[in-house]
Amino acid sequence: MNNFNYISTIIFSVLLIIFGGIIIANPEGTMAAFAVFISIIMIITGIFNITLYRSMKEFKGSIYYLIEGAVSIIIAILLLSSAEALKNFVPLLIGFWIALKSATAIITAVEFKKGDNPNYKPVLTGGVLGIALTLLIAAFPKIVSIYISFILGIAFIAVGIFIIFFAYKMRK
């Protein structure tokens, strides 16, 4: 590893560690940024589900993909339109979105089982786990927000430290 790559890698790693510390110290700001990120993902999955509905009209449970897609896009627009007003509702809206996706998964699993599709078990398991996560979010929205920020911050710090060790080993 040449000197320039080593120094830029160390700078990048230190920035990751600093950013991780900022994330841990500022969970509200993290949730606002997280809301924007999740909103973009929700719009993309919403468009995907609407497209999926159009290609699966013969599938009995396909209407749920259309509903999930439309609701995902609406929730994402709400999150993007007024981040300050919705800051307290981010965990609940995300929980609602997870519940909607989980319900669609459970309905899909039931339809798969009726059609003797052996893939119904993992789809059903994912749906049930999603509902359990939704209940956790609904019960403790503020704790979930702080937990997400804390885990994200720890991950950034850990990756930064790992990259520093890796760069040091590569330099030898």
Image (tube, helix red, strand yellow):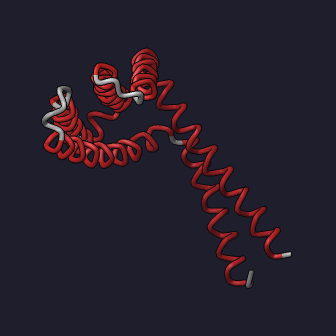
Left or right for 143, reference 110:
right
Quadrant (top left, top right, bottom left, bottom right) of the C terminus: bottom right
| Residue at the spot 57% in from the left edge and 54% down from the top edge | 19
Number of marks: 0
Quadrant showing the N terminus: bottom right
* Coordinates of residue 168 in the picture (x, y in percent): 80, 69
Left or right: where 33 falls relative to 3: left
Q: Is residue 89 visible?
A: no
Placement of 8 over or under 142, stated as above or below: below
Rendered location of residue 51, percent (x, y): 18, 46
At 65% across and 55% down in the image, what residue appears?
Answer: 17
Image location of residue 69, percent across then percent down: 20, 38
Looking at the image, residue 13 lies above or below residue 100:
below
Q: Is residue 61 among what the camera can see?
A: yes
Q: Quadrant of residue 107?
A: top left
For the point 40% across and 23% down, the residue is 124
Task: Specify whether 93 is left or right of 170.
Answer: left
Question: Residue 78 at x, y = what percent?
Answer: 21, 38
Q: Residue at x 45, y 28 (%)?
A: 122
When the figure is inspected, residue 54 is found, relative to residue 112, above or below; the finding is: below
> Residue extending furthest front?
116
Is 89 in front, or is 109? Answer: 109
- Frontmost residue, 7 versus 168: 168
